[in-house]
Amino acid sequence: MKVMVMVKASPGSEAGKMPSAELLTAMGQFNEELVKAGIMESGDGLKPSSQGYRIRFSGDKRVVTTGPFTETNELIAGYWIWNVNSMEEAIEWAKKCPNPMDDEDSDIEIRTFYSMEDFAEADVDGKAAAHENTLRQTIAMQKVEVQNYLFFSGRCDEALAFYKQHLSAEIKFLIRFNESPEPMPEGMLQSGFENKVMHAEFSLGNVRVMASDGCNDVEKFSGFRLALSVPTEEETRRIFNALASDGGKVDMPLTKTFWSPLYGQVTDKFGVGWMLMIPGEEAPQ
C-alpha cells in the first residue's frame, strides 16, 4: 500500500520558523529508521505558502493567485511517501515521529494513493492503464545511468597507459583477478590471466569509463564507438592522430560535415572505435 504522509502547516511553519538542531537530529534518526525498514520512498519539507502559488480552474479560465494562503490548518508543510503493508502500519510509524512543529501542536495526515485498478470502471479497454504504465517506465528510465564498459582481451594495462598518455585519462580504480575477494568460478578465467585487470575505472573528460581484460583473449570489440566532442581543431587533430598511431586505423578522415565543422572516425590499436568531432557551427580555420 502506497501512502502520502502529510505534515500539516502551523503558524510557525507559515512564518518561516526553522526547526531546532534537536528536531533536525531527531527527524533524521526517524527517517533513518524508515529507510532501514524499507518503507520510505521519498520525503521533503515545503517552504511557507507565502512563496507559493495557486491556479484556479473555472471552465477554460486559469486564475493565478500568489500566497500566503490563510487556511493554515489546510496547508501542508512537508510530506513522506511510504510503502506499507497496511494503514495500521502507517499509523504506527506516524505515531513514532517526533513532533514536526517542535514546540507547537501539529497534525499528520495519512492518505492512500489511488492505483489504476481503482479506475477500471472508467478505463474499460485498459488504454489509460497501459499509458500510465508506459509513463512510469519512462520516468524510471530517466533515472538510469548508461556507462561505457570496455573489454581489452588481456591488453587493459597497455590501453590504460595509452589513454593516460594521449587522452589525459585518470585511473580512478583498479583491481586484478588475483586481488578479488572471491575466487572466479572454476574454468571461467583463462590460464595466465590471474594478474590481469578484473575491473578498472578511468575518467575521460567529464565521463567515467569502466574497463577490464575480460576472462580471455578471444573476445573482440564490435558494433560500437566512443564519441568525443572536442572544443578545438588543434586538440581534435592531436587526439585523432594519437589514436590512429602505432597500429591504429583511420576509418574516416577528419573532414567538415553538415553536423560538425570537423568530424572523423578512427579505430585504435586495441580495437576500440572512436568518433571525434568539434561541436557548433563555426568552421575550423
Image: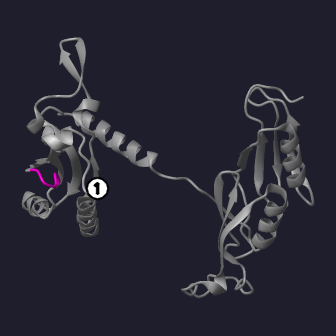
Q: Is disc 1 placed on a helix, strand or loop? A: strand
Between 262 and 32, the one nearer to me in the picture:
32
Report the side of 25 relative to 234 (left or right).
Answer: left
Q: Measuring from the top left, give residue 103's x and y in whole percent.
A: 13, 54
Residue 32 in the figure: left or right of residue 157: left
Q: Mark 1 points at which residue?
A: 41
Crowding at mark 1 (Cα within 10 Å: few <14, some 14-19, many 20+) = some
Between residues 139 and 217, which one lies in front from this camera angle?
Answer: 139
Percent x, y for residue 61?
23, 11
Instruction: Tell me which segment is drawn in magenta.
Output: 100-104
Rendered position, 256 above or below 248: above
- The residue under the point 83% across, 26% down is 283
Q: Which amino acid does label 1 sit on?
A: Glu
Depth check: give the residue in front, 139 or 250: 139
Q: Residue furthest top?
A: 60
Q: Can residue 114 be seen in this view?
A: no
Q: Is residue 250 magenta?
A: no
Q: Which residue is rendered at x = 79% and y = 62% of the image?
A: 164
